[in-house]
Image (cartoon, rainbow, N blue to C red):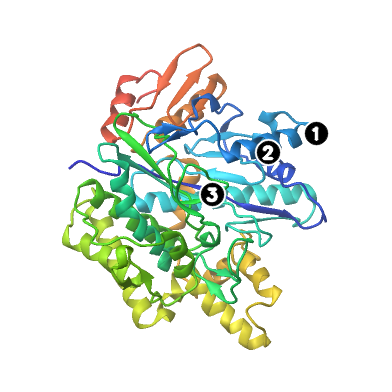
Amino acid sequence: MTVAVPLLGLETEYGIIREDLDDSDPVEESMALLKQCAMKSVFQAWTYSRERTHLDMRGFTVTHLAQDEEEDEFCAEDRKRPYSYWDMKCDRVLVNGARFYNDHTHPEYSTPECRGVFELVTHDQAGDRILLDCVRRRNQELGGPHVQVFKNNTDYSGHSYGTHDNYTIPRRLDFDVWVRGLVPFLVTRQLYAGAGKVGTDGGKVEPFSGLQLGQRSDFVECVLSIETMTQRPIINTRDEPHASTDVYRRLHLILGDANMSPYATALKLGTTRLVLALIADEKLALPWELEDPVRDVQRTSRDLTGTVLLQRANAAGTITPLDIQAWYLEQAKRHPGHLADADEEQWIVQEWERTLNDLKEDPHKLSDRIDWAIKENLFTQFIEAEGLMWDDPVMQSLDLEYHNLDPERGLYYGLVESGDLKTFTPEAEVDRAVHNAPPTTRARIRGQMVDQEQDNIRGIHWTGIEFKNGEYLDLTDIIHEQDVEQVLETNKELFAWK
């Protein structure tokens, strides 16, 4: 069968603080952290000339982005620092095919391209492990546990940093078809994909006391936009496929949360991939649209029951987030067989249905696997024991500590250690993913070149590798498993084929 969504990936920007300094520089702290990476890698060779950030999937090229201004401001500030641009980026391409670099004020880990949801969840956890190893090495250098890193999306000072899920999708359908099919789903997938957030953050939304579903929901400002740092959209329109432009798009979603729970990550990625496959195969005829999707992102986030009424377009009545998700689930059940891995598809549909049923019947049942529900259960107990209110400042501090990667401090890891939460991926698989690329995607080729030709690489990117002798290995069209095998077979000498 033709796989409608052949490749997936995750980009995670991590929050970072230096606790022993009152006024630390996050750029320098991110640089120092990245320099502690002990993995075999190609350093400072990322080919930025191959980036295409100004092409829009709506069919035009923008001449200016708001982030260009921010980039100029960063550059002006950076010129005051005694470092080059390359020093500050600290770009690394790792032996497992991933990219690890400094995105201005945040260390960012971009997973290698993966073939399946479970494989991607494993590589996402491998990224956490790589970050944690860097933190440990940095703190050994500093002589104390001074640097802390958080897998979350807000610093509670008005700043949000992203977790972007990416999907290779076919270009043959009009972009509007993807938008119509996706928007209601994305507005409401936070019912299980939300990481939970205490109160509000940012000056553009109404105050709220309590627990929200989503961390990024306060920062969503429009339905469509090519921007990523301002005017954050439900669907990002950047047209940068990292593949054959004539055949593929890359759907780059920036509205999602960083999940500590691997189960929640898997359900988020799996349901999204399945919906995309249904759209690609033209099996998704949406009977309604939402009148105000942006407002509905916030409204959905502030109701833990999934029963808030959202207005349909054209005065067609109301619908709840739960009913929207149930409709998408029903389409997936009615039209099976859209993923190459039947077991993976079965798991997605089964767990999607179980989660929606649990939310409808007894939301407490979600507190063993869904981040916002885990927080709601844990924080409610703390509030009752300490006689606090949700808007007490200590609650936002607890929220941050839930996402701390330090297993000695992170509340999520404490719950796993105590047996309150189950592990999702075998430790051996995560360990393997730290040092090994997915075997059936082009990341295998990239990782093997990093391993074998580390000192001979001049430039490297998702779509190709340039060697110092002038040769170029083009990975643009390496999408399917048979493409990977063909490259390995054709270049036996280069890959030391055995």
Is the residue marked by circle 2 packed among few (<14), some (14-19), or many (20+) residues within 10 Å? some
Q: CA distance from mark 1 to mark 2?
A: 21 Å
For the point 36% across and 69% down, the residue is 311
Q: Earlier in the sequence, mark 1 or mark 2?
A: 2
Helix, strand or loop status at disc 3: loop
Residue at figure coordinates x 24%, y 43% from the top left: 3
Q: Amino acid at mark 2?
A: Lys
**Outermost front residue:** 315
- Identify residue for label 3: 231
Three-letter amino acid code at disc 1? Answer: Lys
Residue at the image point whose x is 21% and y is 56% from the top:
285
Q: CA distance from mark 2 to mark 3?
A: 33 Å
Label pair 2/3, CB-CB below 8 angstroms = no
Q: Secondary structure at mark 2?
A: loop
Neighbor class of circle 3 (other Cα within 10 Å; few <14, some 14-19, many 20+) is some
**Residue kind at label 3, given as amino acid type:** Gln
Q: Mark number for residue 80?
A: 1
Q: Is residue 329 left or right of residue 386?
A: left
Q: Are marks 1 and 2 in contact (CB under 8 Å)?
A: no
Residue 55: x and y in percent read 44, 32
- Image location of residue 377, percent across then percent down: 52, 79
Q: Which residue is mark 2?
A: 35
| Mark toward the start of the polypeptide (3 vs 1) | 1
